[in-house]
Image (spheres, rainbow, N blue to C red):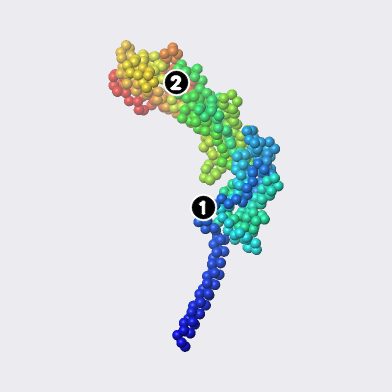
């Protein structure tokens, strides 16, 4: 065989091998391409988020939008009458006469009416098996009609490695990928569209509402807890610095509310929303199931001249790790699931709510302070003396000058002792009848001529009842009265006062 013939044979063999390899490559590539497409669109295609229009309609032209999905089914239509201030509004067939979150409904309609795709997987799927894409029996079907123009969208499986879902439109042979937001916005539990507002935010953002009454009724309490505005007329110094709290308990006793609890107790509910809505117009069986037939608490609150809220609070439930309770409010047929942090009334007792400081007279308003115990009486004369300096507001600064029996005392040392007297820590409310005489009395005479009197009664077992102007409302410890008396002797002896007790 000559050299030329040999080379031709070798070349022919190489061609055959290459052709065979190419055929195998094409077959494998086709199979792999089918598998890759079934598992998901490449992330590179979706990173560009190309805005390719699928549907381009005006939401104002909606006839209906029907969703049949894994989370439920519902139909949206244009409402006969728009909401106040709106040109148009939507309603839901299944929720006639129920309060709706119409902004969420608008978002759902807009998402469908302006649908776009992220990628086109196949331009023509005619004859293809679509089960790999979850579209032979789609889990979600959405149909929308806009002045007779009808679109039916099927959503299938999620794509792999990208935030999308396979999608097809009826009458269009193409297979698309749309953003996950299509399903997350539309394939929802219909209850999502119910209004979850517990109480609207207060109109005036510059100040809190003026609460006129809060009543808490619970089966575990011996009497209702009632809170109202502090009656400052009961105090000689009627300024809020004297009262120290804007609100007071009026039941089971009359005493100031801890100011640190005011926000949680009274104001956090404004602007609040439920986590979920689980029922509407509940049956008696549902009321019992949710603990609303025999509630854990019933709360009524009023504010300003016309504001009011009445809540019935039922059993506990846990939502995504958050402890909640079932709640209904007057005027609404819905059963809400509400974060328990918005419902402090189910746990608070009157003991928890009392202000730790029964009375806090502002020292600059006091002209005379008298303390008596053990048959002795001690009277201090207070006056404000100019320091000769002015503050940032241009006002002349003063300091308190104190005299006892005509002798001047160290004003700083007296201020420490005065602060000790103010630091009486109320442990809780008093439920005992007081029949004994006070073991200590402190009287404040103010610059305006009015007075406040605080009496302390020893009830035994180291318990002392604190009575402000005759209201024997709270208790403290004998450690406090003993400390005040012992440190008074140090003050009068010119020794340094220690207020820790």
Name the residue beneath numbered marker 2.
242
Q: Can residue 380 be spotted in the picture?
A: no
Q: Is residue 480 above or below residue 184?
A: above
Q: Is residue 101 above or below residue 117?
A: above
In the displayed structure image, the side of residue 71 where residue 402 appears, left or right: left
Q: Are marks 2 and 1 in contact (CB under 8 Å)?
A: no
Q: Can residue 20 be spotted in the picture?
A: yes
* Count of numbered labels shown in the rendering: 2
- Asked which quadrant contains residue 337, the reply is top right
Quick one: label 2, few (<14), some, or many (20+) residues within 10 Å? some
Q: Position of residue 375 (x, y in %)?
A: 38, 15
Residue at the left extreme of this rendering: 494
Q: Position of residue 100 (x, y in %)?
A: 63, 39
Q: Position of residue 346 (x, y in %)?
A: 54, 35
In the displayed structure image, the side of residue 91 where residue 475 appears, left or right: left
Q: Secondary structure at mark 1?
A: loop
Q: Secondary structure at mark 2?
A: helix
Tag on residue 114? Answer: none
Residue at the bottom extreme of this rendering: 1
Residue drawn at point x = 60 percent, y = 41 percent: 104
Rendered-image quadrant of the C terminus: top left
Q: Earlier in the sequence, mark 2 or mark 1?
A: 1
Q: Is residue 422 above or below residue 316?
A: above
Quick one: label 1, few (<14), some, or many (20+) residues within 10 Å? few
Q: Is residue 177 above or below residue 29?
A: above
Residue in front for this viewpoint, 36 or 328: 36
Residue in front for this viewpoint, 474 or 72: 72
Name the residue beneath numbered marker 1.
48
Residue drawn at point x = 61 percent, y = 57 percent: 175
In the displayed structure image, the side of residue 460 where residue 231 appears, left or right: right
């Amino acid at each position: 065989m000559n050299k030329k013939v040999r080379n031709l044979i070798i070349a022919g063999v190489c061609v055959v091998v290459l052709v065979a390899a190419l055929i195998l490559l094409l077959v494998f590539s086709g199979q792999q391409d089918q598998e890759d497409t079934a598992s998901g669109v490449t992330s590179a295609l979706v990173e560009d988020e190309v805005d390719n229009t699928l549907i381009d309609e005006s939401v104002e032209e909606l006839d209906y939008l029907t969703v049949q999905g894994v989370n439920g089914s519902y139909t949206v239509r244009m409402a006969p009458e728009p909401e106040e201030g709106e040109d148009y509004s939507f309603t839901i067939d299944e929720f006639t006469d129920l309060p709706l979150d119409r902004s969420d409904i608008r978002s759902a309609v807009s998402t469908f009416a302006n649908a776009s795709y992220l990628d086109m997987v196949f331009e023509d799927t005619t004859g293809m098996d679509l089960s790999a894409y979850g579209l032979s029996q789609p889990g979600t079907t959405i149909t929308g009609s806009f002045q007779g123009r009808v679109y039916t969208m099927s959503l299938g499986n999620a794509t792999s490695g990208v935030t999308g879902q396979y999608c097809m439109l009826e009458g269009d042979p193409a297979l698309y990928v749309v953003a996950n937001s299509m399903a997350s916005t539309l394939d929802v539990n219909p209850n999502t569209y119910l209004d979850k507002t517990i109480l609207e935010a207060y109109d005036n953002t510059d100040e809190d509402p003026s609460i006129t009454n809060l009543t808490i009724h619970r089966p575990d309490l011996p009497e209702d807890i009632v809170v109202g505005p502090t009656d400052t007329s009961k105090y000689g110094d009627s300024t809020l610095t004297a009262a120290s709290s804007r609100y007071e308990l009026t039941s089971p006793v009359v005493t100031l509310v801890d100011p640190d609890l005011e926000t949680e107790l009274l104001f956090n509910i404004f602007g609040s929303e439920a986590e979920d809505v689980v029922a509407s117009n509940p049956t008696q069986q549902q009321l019992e199931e949710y603990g609303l037939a025999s509630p854990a608490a019933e709360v009524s609150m009023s504010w300003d001249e016309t504001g009011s809220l009445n809540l019935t609070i039922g059993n506990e439930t846990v939502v995504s790790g958050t402890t909640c309770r079932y709640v209904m409010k007057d005027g609404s047929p819905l059963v809400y699931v509400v974060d328990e942090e918005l419902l402090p009334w189910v746990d608070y007792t009157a003991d928890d709510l009392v202000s730790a400081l029964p009375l806090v007279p502002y020292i600059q308003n006091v002209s005379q302070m008298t303390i008596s115990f053990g048959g002795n009486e001690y009277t201090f004369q207070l006056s404000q003396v100019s320091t000769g300096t002015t503050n940032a507001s241009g006002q002349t600064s003063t300091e308190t000058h104190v005299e006892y029996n005509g002798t001047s005392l160290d004003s700083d040392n007296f201020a420490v002792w005065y602060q000790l007297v103010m630091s009486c820590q109320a442990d809780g409310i008093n439920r005992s009848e007081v029949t004994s005489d006070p073991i200590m009395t402190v009287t404040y005479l103010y610059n305006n001529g009015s007075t406040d009197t605080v009496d302390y009664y020893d009830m035994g077992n180291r318990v002392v009842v604190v009575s402000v102007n005759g209201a024997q409302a709270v208790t403290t410890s004998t450690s406090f009265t003993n400390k005040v008396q012992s440190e008074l002797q140090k003050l009068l002896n010119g020794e340094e006062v220690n207020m820790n007790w």
